[in-house]
Amino acid sequence: MTQKKFLVVDDSTTMRRIVANSLKAIGYTDFVEAGDGREAISKLDADSTINFIITDWNMPEVSGLELVRSIRSNDKYGKLPILMVTTRGLKEDILEALQAKVNNYVVKPFTPQILREKIDQILASI
Amino acid sequence: MDSKNSMENVFSKLGDLKQFFVFGQKIVPVIQKIIDFMSDIVPLLENVNNSIQDSTSKIPKASNQINSVTSANEIATSEILDIIDDMFVDLSTIKNGLAELKTDQNSEKIKALNEVVEKIEMDSSRITISLQVQDITSQQLASVNHLIDSVQDKLSSLLSDLGKQQDKPIPKFDPNSITGQDSDYALSNGTFNENARYDRSTEKQDLVDTLVLENTKTSQEEIDKLFAK
């Protein structure tokens, strides 16, 4: 398995821990965390070793969707794979996220298996 | 002739005056009823006004209580996650210990014990998944708080129109006012999904997978078209 450095973005401490634990459970141990989109951008600007982003949608300051658009418009890290993990499961939400160019999408509650499946799909497609 | 006209004029005026008094006699009871009605309705309106003010003043307390619930849930969830983390460390120690104890004679027994350890690990993992309910319910509660906040705004506006606001200012709900609790919710007030549901069925994820697949196909078709040109 190629080792990846994940940026886990969620305003809920609980969810960040659950995503981190799930990553550990499927063999990924290198990750950093951010509490909202603005913090995530700061982390991306400061750390060029981050090569995979897992983000929530509903967050203060800069939402997950705004974060995705911001990343995609950036020359430095615009092509990084992004997996959105959110409670938003309506068709229009999913389509909006796909239009913003997320690589894949997971609806909460999720299992580590689903997380692994989506990460693998993304890594296989890039 | 002038004198006759003047007298007729005076009589006409007196007639009008008489009619006015007759009308007055008729209207006085109606006016009295209106006065009585106003006397009755004013205290009633005052009561309604006070009730609205009382209800409005209680709204921040309700909002803070909801926040306290969210906060308490988050703390409890974090504690459970701490315990699960410790359990994983302990289970890892047991697994290592079992590997060291393994001999040809007890290999079957050790294998069985390892299976028990793995089952406990899987169960712990399932508990972790279920704890996502905390994030989902916190978004539902945030949605309720948002609704309460909207009602408070409307009631405050009504009270302001009624001139009551000056008498006793209504404290505005402050999500950051929860003392002694570091609430993630407080920081993220308003950033919620009102449709958040704890639903373990795969229906939503199946929809995602279909749409992602369609999107990928469309993208690939667009790429193929570009290369075909």
Image (cartoon, rainbow, N blue to C red):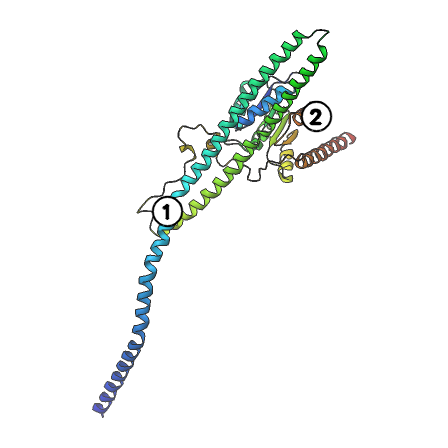
Find out whether the residues at labels 2 and 1 contact each other: C-beta distance under 8 Å. Answer: no
Badge 1: how crowded within 10 Å, few (<14), some, or many (20+)?
few
> In this orientation, which residue lies closer to the viewer: B181 or A103?
B181
Count of marks placed on residues: 2
Identify the subunit bearing mark 1.
Answer: B
The amino acid on which the numbered mark 2 sits, given as a three-letter code, is Gln
**What is the quadrant of the C terminus of chain B in the image?**
top right
Q: Is residue A102 above or below residue B165?
A: above
Q: Please, is residue B36 above or below residue A77 in the view? A: below
Is residue B4 found left or right of B123 in the rendered image? Answer: left
In the picture, the disc for residue A121 is: 2
Left or right, A42 with reference to B176: right
Mark 1: amino acid? Asp
Q: Quadrant of residue B176?
A: top left
**Label at residue B54:** 1
In this orientation, does residue B118 appear?
Answer: yes
Using the image, determine if residue A25 lies above or below residue B142: above
